[in-house]
Amino acid sequence: MDDDTHAGARHFCDLMEQVRGGSPPPAVLVAGCGLGHEARYIHARLGGETVGVDRVLADEAREPAPEGCTLMEASVLELPFEDESFDAVFYHHVIEHVPDAPGSLVELARVLRPGGWLYVGTPNRHRVVGYLGSFDATLRDKLAWNLADYRARLRGEFRNELGAHAGFTEGELRRLMDPHFTDHRSLTSDYLHFKYGRRLPAPVLRVVADTPIAAVAAPGIYALARRPGHHTPEVGDD
C-alpha cells in the first residue's frame, strides 16, 4: 500500500498507535471493507484481530486472508457480533452509502468497548470539487462524477438517501455522532496534510485545510470519537 492508496487506513493506524499507547494489539472492525485491502493493511500494521464486513463481498475480498483477519458479509445496521466486541472501528467513506446513517452509529457504538475509538471519513457535502484523492479513478471518471454531483444539486437531489454521493458537513457528522460518542475531534486538517502534504504546494494546502475556505475546499471530512467509558490516552500524550 503506497502513499497514493488508502491514506485513510494509514492515518487510522498512526492515530491508533498514538491513542492506545502501549496497550495490547486491538480488535478492529472495518465497517465497509470493500476489496479488503484496508482490513489486511490494518491487521498487518496493528496486529490483534481485524474483522472486515461489507454488505456484499467483492471477489477480491473473498481471497484467503492472514490468520487473525476475517472478511465477511454483514450489514453495519445489523452486525453479527456481541456487545463490546471491538477496541476500534474504521468507518471510512461508507456512512454516506448506508440507508440509515444514524442507525449505523448506534450499532457501531454497541459493538465498541467502553473507551473504544470510532474513526469516520466521508465526503464533504459542501465541497466545490470532489474525488481528487480517488486513487483508482481516471481524470475522466472524476470529471464525470463531479458533473453528476452538480446535476443532482441543481435538481435538489444531492442527498445520500437519494443515491447521491453527497456525504455530510462537519456539523452534520458531529450531530450524528454526539448522542453515542464523546471526545469528538475533527481530523480534517490533519488528514489533508497527511494525504496531500507531498502532493500539493504548501500555500495551496494551507488554504484547503487550515482556513475558513476549507468548509467548501476540503473534498472530505474526518473525525475521531470515543465510546464513553474508561480513560484511554489522548492523541499526543506521552
Image (cartoon, grey):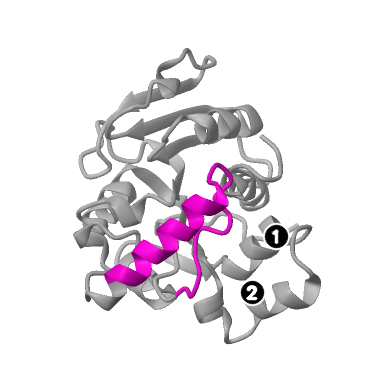
Which residues fall within the magenta stretch? 127-152
First-in-chain label (1 vs 2): 1
Q: Which mark is residue 209?
A: 2
Which amino acid lies under the numbered mark 2 shown in the image of this protein? Ala
Q: Which residue is mark 1?
A: 196
At a point 45% along the width and 30% down the height, the residue shown is: 35
Residue furthest to the bottom: 212
Say which of 127 and 177 sits in front: 127
**Relative to 212, 118 lies left or right:** left
**Relative to 14, 29 lies left or right:** left
At a point 58% along the width and 46% down the height, the residue shown is: 135
Between the residue at mark 1 and the residue at mark 2, the CA separation in whole angstroms equals 10 Å
At a point 66% along the width and 34% down the height, the residue shown is: 1
Say which of 144 and 179 sits in front: 144
How far from the left and from the top, in percent, is residue 58? 37, 26
Residue furthest to the front: 140
Confirm whether residue 226 shows in the render: no
At a point 20% along the width and 39% down the height, the residue shown is: 78
Relative to 197, residue 87 above or below: above
**Relative to 59, 87 lies left or right:** right
How far from the left and from the top, in percent, is residue 84? 34, 41
How far from the left and from the top, in percent, is residue 55? 27, 34
